[in-house]
Image (cartoon, helix red, strand yellow):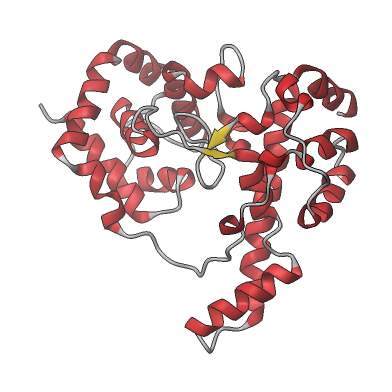
Amino acid sequence: MRGLILILLLFFPSFTEGHAATEIPNAYKPLIERLSRDGFHDQFLSKLFMDDRAEVIPNRMVIPLISKEKEEWYSQFLTPESILLAKKFYQQNLTSLKKVEKEFKVDKEVIVAILLVESRFGENIGKHRVVPTLASMAIMDSPDNLQSNFLILREKDPELAFESVENRAKRRANWAYNELKCFLTILRDETLDPLEVKGSHAGALGIPQFIPSSYLTFAIRKSGFETWLSSKEEALLSIANYLSLNGWKKKMSVEQKRKVLWSYNHSEPYIETILTVAAKIREK
């Protein structure tokens, strides 16, 4: 891995040439040490986190309380305009969709519904730099951040226990750390500047909005990562592959469909929206 990371330094001209801050932010130092222990080259990590584009994002370090997604968040995808957009995409890409459905045994209408909800077919793939987004989340369990977040949250809920905040922060931070490692692994074989890759507020990537670990496991790419980010064809293939490998089959029951979609997004309103949009696409 160390040799590959050195290759990154040679082939990312905008990364190696500038945007350098005077030193690595203190908040990132434990994260860098952890990444170094996991095999990433020290020189690469120093260059990456000294760059001012990698600056810590405070609002990504906020520890959220557990809350369920609300149905109204998804109402925008059920408007006549959104359904019309989905049907238009469906018709324009019907030949490709039929091929994908035949190969993966995944309903083409469901694939289109996911693309609508995830990124409106590539219109909204995210504007947040992936590295500082995931890195900031990965350090949300630092002692100082835990204490400051706990004091704020306790004002809203005086009965809140510090342990519950700490446990939630550690789970979220470990998730983000693993996704950051996956993202840096993706970039090993690319010539992209890692600090110019943007995604969602949680680090999801491309038209299908795959988190980095999902990209490594399920993405189907004909060229490389940069092409995949904006390729509608590869988005269709990747979503179909994701659903297929998670158990999707033709003529499944609705409950079985819900179970597979849960793997894509742990949200009941999300699942219901996907199934509703898919049904509306089928309507003549």
Is residue 220 depicted above or below 214 in this figure? above
Quadrant of the rendered image containing residue 174: bottom right
Is residue 268 depicted above or below 86 in this figure? below
- Residue 3 position, x and y percent, is 89, 23
Q: Is residue 262 left or right of residue 49?
A: left
- Residue 21 position, x and y percent, is 77, 42
Quadrant of the rendered image containing residue 41: top right
Residue 217 seen in render: yes
Residue ID at (14%, 37%): 80
Residue ID at (79%, 41%): 50
Q: Nearer the viewer, residue 154 or 88?
A: 154
Q: For the C terminus, which image quadrant?
A: top left
Q: Is residue 171 left or right of residue 82?
A: right
- Residue 142 position, x and y percent, is 74, 65
Residue ID at (53%, 34%): 205
Quadrant of the rendered image containing residue 214: top right
Q: Is residue 59 left or right of residue 41?
A: left
Residue ID at (61%, 39%): 130
The extreme front residue here reads 22
The extreme bottom residue here reads 159
Q: For the N terminus, which image quadrant?
A: top right
- Residue 113 position, x and y percent, is 31, 34
Total number of numbered discs in the rendering: 0
